[in-house]
Image (cartoon, grey):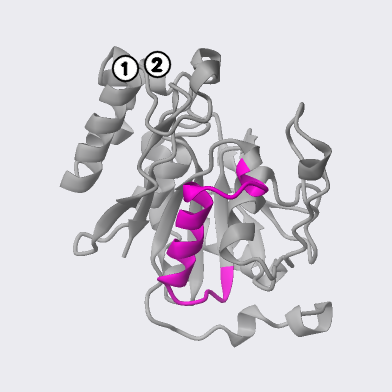
Amino acid sequence: MNLNDLQNISDNFVNTQRMPVLFLGHGSPMNAIEENQFVQGFRKAAQEIPKPNAILCISAHWYTQGTFVTAMDMPRTIHDFGGFPKALFDVQYPAPGDPELAKETVELLAPVLVEEDHNWGLDHGAWSVIKHMYPEADIPVIQLSIDYTKPPQYHFDLAKRLNKLREKGILIIGSGNIVHNLRLIDWKNIDTVGAGWDWAVEAREKTNNWLLDGNFQNIIDYQKQGTFLQYAVPTPDHYLPLIYTLGLKDQAENLSLFNDELIGGSLSMTSVRIG
């Protein structure tokens, strides 16, 4: 796919069967180059849904003051991490962007001010999972940033305005981790699937129950739920992409979990499909 093919790609989007929405627990950047049950879960998720016309990703790793959307033709692959093997830094994911989809996103989110960005690109919260789902990098990808000055309820309500995109074949992905406490990682069990501290086990069980029961208000109000979630969500950056995903759910839609495992004591790979 070249730039000429992309010039009017959004103009060619027609109403489609309503696309599902995904929240992907992305875990370690090493998942980008390793073969394990979690990347197999990402691939399976892609195989079970229609191929999208484009992807809009809300990643934990684009955390900004204000809201931005990538609007360049060819976003760069951002290696926003350190201390990993050269092979990981060598990975490129040359998916095109979609400036027209970016403009439509700005319009849908009005009157909230959303600025078009031409500098960011695709961070590893986006490309490390999308590369397993669509390895040909032939689907345009844009990112929407997370405004760190706003509370969870704001993000839940903002997400609802994106629902129209689902009717145009746009796959919306939130990428983060529900349980994500890097300071309390159990390094002896960093690769042990199922390893979790007691508070992480409780956080996984409670949030899973709330997700499956449709009790999203408890998830939004996570700071009121007790010590176990304070440990699980010491900062909201990896948690808020889940809130965007839940904001897009219609009452009649199904919600299911996959990759639902703890790892390394203080991380969960739990992922969510809606629709």
Q: Are marks 1 and 2 in contact (CB under 8 Å)?
A: yes
Which residue is identified by label 2? 231
| Residue 121: x %, y % from top left | 75, 51
- For disc 1, the neighbor class at 10 Å (few under 14, some 14 to 19, many from 20) is some
The magenta stretch spans residue 32: yes
Q: Amino acid at mark 1?
A: Trp
In the image, the segment drawn in magenta is 31-54
| Element type where label 2 sits in the image | helix
| Residue 12: x %, y % from top left | 61, 87
| Residue 172: x %, y % from top left | 49, 60
The magenta stretch spans residue 110: no
Q: Amino acid at mark 2?
A: Tyr
Front of the two marks 1 and 2: 1
Q: Nearer the viewer, residue 80 or 172?
A: 80
Whether residue 225 sits left or right of residue 167 in the image: it is left
Residue pictured at 60% horizontal, 44% vertical: 31
Q: CA distance from mark 1 to mark 2?
A: 7 Å
Residue pictured at 43% horizontal, 83% vertical: 16
Q: Which mark is residue 160?
A: none
Which residue is identified by label 1? 199
Residue pictured at 73% horizontal, 32% vertical: 81
Residue pictured at 48% horizontal, 32% vertical: 150
| Element type where label 1 sits in the image | helix
* Residue 239 can be seen in this image: yes
Q: Nearer the viewer, residue 146 or 195?
A: 195
Q: Nearer the viewer, residue 170 or 209?
A: 209
* Residue 62 can be seen in this image: no
